[in-house]
Image (tube, helix red, strand yellow):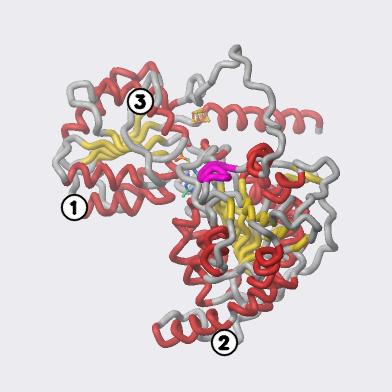
Amino acid sequence: MLLGDEAIAQAAIDAGMSGIYAYPGTPSTEITEYIMHSKEAKSGQIRAGWSTNEKTAMEAALGMSYAGKRTMVCMKHVGLNVAADAFINSAITGANGGLIVVSADDPSMHSSQNEQDSRVYGKFALIPVLEPTNQQDAYDMVHYGFDMSEKLGVPVLIRITTRLAHSRAGILRKPTRAQNELHLPVNPRQFILLPANARRQYKNLLNKQDEFEKYAFNSGFNVYTDSNDKSIGIITTGIAYNYLLENYPDRIVPFPVLKIAQYPIPHSMIEEIYNSCEKLLILEEGYPVVEESVKGFLNTGKTIHGRLDGTVPRDGELNPNIVAVALGLKNTRGKDIPSIVADRPPSLCKGCPHIYSYNALNEALESWSKGRVFSDIGCYTLGALEPFDAINSCVDMGASITMAKGAADAGLLPAVAVIGDSTFTHSGITGLIDCVKDNSKITIVILDNETTAMTGGQDSSAFGRIENICKGVGVKKEHIIVLDPSPKHHNENIAIMKKELMYEGVSVIIPRRECIQTALKHKKEHKRIEVVQMEN
Ligand SMILES: Cc1ncc(C[n+]2csc(CCOP(=O)(O)OP(=O)(O)O)c2C)c(N)n1
Ligand code: SF4
């Protein structure tokens, strides 16, 4: 019984993958964690670990593919924005060893800033996309994806969504196979994207598009199931297929159904269902990608229902009930939530070091008007909520420092950036270099809880090195100040913050105390080791 994420991870191990690169992000994190904890990774047969961000992960995976080995790179959907430069260009260089990119989308934004649909990125890069319907598909598609990547010489994108990543099913495994031997690309110039080569490589990619579609037609992942009642034809993508089946107790849908799980969409399959049915209903998790493309190439006036005409809500994830309503079936929504169940907004853990940093910062800023604290993404984003009401922005990883810089350039003084230690290395450092170059008048607070807490406590790339990094990029030594964010240092911390807020240059304050949750975990591990040692 494996989570969708775990099924992908186990498949990668079984399929002879040599290395996985990733930056954590819900709902993709468990793929890498599963492989990191595997015996293959622990014995050094598979390279597994966290990268500093999604772009470095994507590039390292491309390097491993260049060297002829199978590799995977995993991220949440917004991570693909960070990796996009390398990702799009990897379609042009092509792959040597099998290269799979897994992007985990989060429709309904359970833990994300947006609900972008990674299938669009696949189309943009012009590479094959696989979208599992269930956990077994996810497992099988990794094997298939590595083979396709090696045969066609391109990276393959696997797009999953939250419910698939985080629900379990029984998996039938395939026999394990050996890893590839080290072998360099046959064409030694394919990875050199100088214009003359890039033009050739791009034409190669364009010439492969028909073959990609043939693969999608023949793989068996896209399935057309006919039925006598042609009053409506239903197209589903990914997990939406399950939501459709759940509406029929015997799992037999009385209408023709086209299940799409591999792209580019085979046009002939779409034409078949379109031509044989009176109208279509398109059910897809995320953007109306298939709907728009069907409307685009089969615009002969038949009704096509889906997200664009409001039959299915334009935003948010699907569920069996939304599908029931779209089909005019009985509304299967359960009972209303009883009023005794109160909404519980997320909050910082009791004793979290971020609490004391915000308490001090709020007091230090009392003599200035509100609206000058640019924050970032991590547990500390909860400083936006009551009782703190301490921050004024959260846009994308790294944006705190650069937005504060822009605001300071515009004359908002003091301008403050608040960023976590992992987010700082992910994409804050480059912004800091801009600030140093311009001697921007900003105060940067790097909340160092010595972990990547929000995604479950992964190691932070700059552990023990933040001051040196700041010094190394040119922040003046006397304006790099480490604090202990605890109540007993409250007044002292306010005084230091006030002083740095007055400084007309780049100032970095580093409140440092370990996250309560990882501290507890480390304490338990320590105890366990002591018990084992005593028993021995
Ligand atoms: C581009 C991108 N990648 C990954 C994530 C997922 N994510 C959200 S916050 C975060 C890191 C938080 O770590 P840190 O900055 O140290 O703050 P903490 O949670 O420890 O307070 C990650 C990986 C994301 N939102 N965006
Ligand atoms: S997990 Fe750690 S950083 Fe996040 S709120 Fe809890 S104590 Fe704070």
Kind of residue indicated by mark 3: Tyr
Q: What residue is shown with label 1?
A: 438
- CA separation, marks 2 and 1? 44 Å
Q: Position of residue 402 (x, y in %)?
A: 29, 48
Of residue 231 and residue 341, the one placed in the foreground of this image is 231
Q: Is mark 3 within 8 Å of ligand 2?
A: no
Is 490 left, or right, of 44 in this rendering?
A: left
Q: Mark 3–mark 2 contact, CB under 8 Å?
A: no
Q: Secondary structure of the magenta portion, mostly?
A: loop
Q: Quadrant of the N terminus?
A: top right
Of residue 520 and residue 419, the one placed in the foreground of this image is 419
Q: Does 535 appear in magenta? A: no
Kind of residue indicated by mark 2: Asn
Q: Position of residue 218 (x, y in %)?
A: 74, 72
Is 495 left, or right, of 489 in this rendering?
A: left
Label 2 secondary element: loop
